[in-house]
Image (tube, helix red, strand yellow):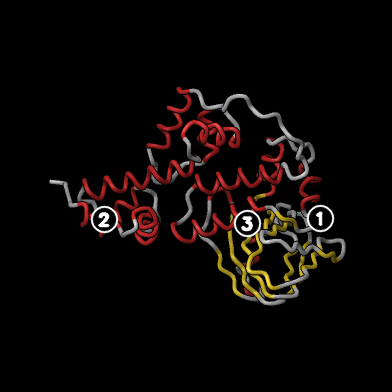
Amino acid sequence: MGSSPNFMTLLRHPQHIVGEVDVGPALPSSVSLARHRAKAHTFKRGITSDVLIIAQQNINATSVMFDLGFGPNEHFCPSTSPVYIVPAEANAQWTLNGESQCVYLALPAQDVTQLFEAFGVTAPAEHLWRLAGRGFDERLVHELVLRLWQEVSNVGPTPLLESSCRVALLHTLARRFQREPTPAAKTTPKLERRLLNRVLEAIHALPPEGVSVERLAQIAGLSPFHFSRLFQNSTGRTPYRYYDELRFQRACDLLTGTSASIGDIGGQLGFANPSQFTRAFSRHAGCSPRRYRTQQGFRCH
């Protein structure tokens, strides 16, 4: 397994790929994203070192034949949010009989196994192969993969977004065959105030390199998924949404209260370049950082 290439290495060799491939920016934790648009084709993935989650969209096909090393089988899922799973050790290829667009999320196999175990999956490898048996409808996973692609493409990657999406979608997949109902809680569990304050302090520091949900969960002494749920119960926001709104407010303060350039402010807040900062800021404010600064008036003396 250690000598197998990762999935993005394969995608960067266009002689093996039919259609158009957009490879996303590098993400933390060896997580990779790409978008693939192609007409009817056969794609020979082969054995790679990571688990592949495929969110298919813009489908104009009625058949998807997957071969995971044991011969071809029909995997097509005729839903609006189809998801396909390919295990790391699968010598995989698939044949699509029509045009489609897919977003690929490649995760290190060890990370998937560790999180499945943390979520109570007793046989992670077996569970993963059950998921890979056929395409299936899973709206939340589909939305998370597409949202992650859109966010990192438009405003750049952040550790908190990537790790939050990864934990949420793997938790959903971990529960795919474990749908037993759980008793409704009589109260809404929240983080203890002292733990919440420590977590908020880490977020409010806004380190340029960002902060992951695993790091915040470690501060609280909880699993990433349990922490994310309690944080949202406590603040009314997911960790990433809280971070995103805080970063926007900090940007407003810096724009109107300092003489720092747009590029410097974006850099302080962890954006890779001014364009990413401008897109992220405009999404909140409805205007560019420069226009916002002009409209609000420059208060620094």
Q: Nearer the viewer, mark 2 or mark 1?
A: 2
Q: Amino acid at mark 2?
A: Tyr
Quarter of image, res 133: bottom right
Q: Earlier in the sequence, mark 3 or mark 2?
A: 3
Query: Can you give x and y, in whole percent of width and height, for residue 101 in the image?
Result: 63, 69
* For residue 259, side relative to residue 6 (left or right): left
* For residue 197, side relative to residue 21 (left or right): left
Query: Can you give x and y, in whole percent of width and height, for residue 89 in the image?
Result: 77, 54
How far apart marks 2 and 1 lie (CA) works out to: 51 Å
The answer to whether residue 119 is above or below residue 251 is above
Q: Amino acid at mark 1?
A: Gly
Circle 3 crowding by C-alpha within 10 Å: few under 14, some 14–19, many from 20: many
* Front-most of residues 211 and 143: 143
Query: Can you give x and y, in whole percent of width and height, for residue 278 in the image?
Result: 35, 59
> At 68% from the left edge and 56% from the top edge, which residue is drawn?
52
> At 26% from the left edge and 59% from the top edge, which residue is drawn?
290
User: Mark 3–mark 2 contact, CB under 8 Å?
Assistant: no
Residue located beneath label 3 in the image: 105
- Residue 292, labelled with which disc? 2
The local secondary structure at tag 3 comes to: strand
Q: Nearer the viewer, mark 1 or mark 3?
A: 1
- Residue 133, labelled with which disc? 1
Q: Amino acid at mark 3?
A: Leu
Q: Earlier in the sequence, mark 2 or mark 1?
A: 1
Q: Earlier in the sequence, mark 1 or mark 3?
A: 3
> At 38% from the left edge and 42% from the top edge, which residue is drawn?
246
How far apart marks 3 and 2 lie (CA) works out to: 35 Å
The local secondary structure at tag 2 comes to: helix
